[in-house]
Amino acid sequence: MVSVEEKLSDIERQNYLIKLQKEFAFAGAVIPSEIVIEGRRLYLKKFVFEMSKKRGSLTSEEISKIDEAISIARKKRKEIVDRLTREDLTAGQAKELYENALGINRAIDTLYMATEPKTSVDEEIKKAKIEEGRRWLNMIRKIYSREEKRKRD
């Protein structure tokens, strides 16, 4: 186990950077209360919560605020990734930066979803059934195509 005060190794640095690129790595991450970039302060956690509650019924003004917040969050995330890439950090500092970046990723994803129309439970069930049917059909096609190959051989 690496001590929090130890210097961050190149391997650990690369591991953090690779993990940040993985899709849905942010699942369960804590959204930072606030972020500051270029002197602009955004109370991110509160804003994300308010906008996600209004999903499907956002005004055009709120959508433009979301776009601006996403832009600010992306800049902050880029700043964090740059710091992880270039600066001499301790393991503790790197972990804190990594966790902040994950939280920002989660916030960005949640804000994107807030602009989408809210779907009903019935619509979600229909979509899930259609997708499940497609998966079954693809599996059956694969099985029968394998059997046809065996008969020919």
Image (cartoon, grey):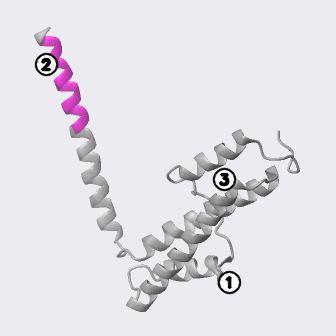
Q: Quadrant of the N terminus?
A: top right
What residue is pinned by disc 3? Answer: 85
Asked if residue 123 lies left or right of residue 145, the reply is right
Q: Residue at x 76, y 42 (%)?
A: 9
Q: CA distance from mark 1 to mark 2?
A: 66 Å
The magenta region covers 138-151
Q: Is residue 110 within the magenta segment?
A: no
Q: Amino acid at mark 1?
A: Gly
Element assignment for label 2: helix
Residue type indicated by callout 2: Glu
Residue at 46%, 83% (x, y): give it.
54
User: Badge 2, how many Cα within 10 Å: few under 14, some, many 20+?
Assistant: few
Mark 1 or 2: in front is 1
As drawn, the residue found furthest toward the left would be 152
**Chief SS of the magenta region:** helix
Q: Report x, y in % for residue 75.
A: 57, 71
Give the mark toward the camera: 2 or 3. Answer: 3
Where does label 2 land, which residue?
A: 148
Q: Secondary structure at mark 3?
A: helix
